[in-house]
Amino acid sequence: AQSVTQLGSHVSVSEGALVLLRCNYSSSVPPYLFWYVQYPNQGLQLLLKYTSAATLVKGINGFEAEFKKSETSFHLTKPSAHMSDAAEYFCAVSGSDSWGKFQFGAGTQVVVTP
Amino acid sequence: KAGVTQTPRYLIKTRGQQVTLSCSPISGHRSVSWYQQTPGQGLQFLFEYFSETQRNKGNFPGRFSGRQFSNSRSEMNVSTLELGDSALYLCASSPRGAKEETQYFGPGTRLLVL
């Protein structure tokens, strides 16, 4: 079975500061990992995904994530936060028993302060 | 391409009633997955359909059911509604439901059970 753990349910960052959202996964098979963002009253939008092609993955809106097998991590970063980054972020994993099934982390709410 | 659409967007029901939610996937996508999102439990997988067949199912009671039509549109039904069924119901589509594929989410249907 696969699972993900997101450390920190709330993160507050200053505008222009580094955004770092942590995700650790558990998987018995090579995982496929995803980061999604959810704005209020909306569905989930894909930021980026890891599918074993490259360990450093670049996504939309300046976000990137690095897959570290030794640490079973897939942390999301953005060098400089913008007010529009205020949203909830979810890490997800799919795996061997997962036709159409993602296992999501609990989510991290990001607040950006001026 | 048009995105995933869900109808209705908002719904208010009373305990004991039943409800049907609809999801139209991205054109060409044959896999539709459903998720329940609540503040307490987060995002939980309900089930996945592909070519009118349920291939995967989450840990929900039998009151939750679904189906898929030949045009890949999907419906989910909840019978004998309980207060705890109040949630945002999200559907997502992908070409085949394979583990490496991105799932594209609709805006969700927000269900309130009174």
Image (tube, coloured by chain):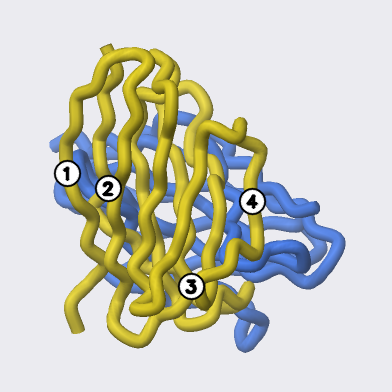
Of tags 3 and 2, which is closer to the observer? 3
Label 4 SS:
strand
How far across and down, in percent of the image, does residue A93 sit?
62, 59
Q: Residue at x 35, y 24 (%)?
A: B86
Residue B57's disc is: 4
Q: Amino acid at mark 1?
A: Arg
Q: Amino acid at mark 3?
A: Ser
Q: Residue at x 23, y 46 (%)?
A: A39
Q: Amino acid at mark 4?
A: Lys
Q: In this rendering, do the residues under marks 2 and 4 share a single chain? A: yes
Q: CA distance from mark 4 to mark 1?
A: 24 Å
Q: CA distance from mark 2 to mark 4?
A: 19 Å
Q: Amino acid at mark 2?
A: Gly
Can I make out residue A50 in this image? yes
Compare marks 3 and 1 and give the one earlier in the sequence: 1
Q: Colour of chain B?
A: yellow
Compare marks 2 and 4 and give the one earlier in the sequence: 4
Tell me: A2 left or right of A108.
right
Q: Which residue is mark 1?
A: B9
Q: Which residue is mark 3?
A: B31
Label 1 SS:
loop
| Chain identifier, blue in the render | A
Snapshot quadrant of residue B94: bottom left
Can I make out residue A12 in this image? no
How far across and down, in percent of the image, does residue B57 sit?
64, 51
A67 is higher (above) or lower (below) than B7: below
Tell me: A2 left or right of B19.
right
A63 is higher (above) or lower (below) than A42: below
Compare marks 3 and 4 and give the one earlier in the sequence: 3
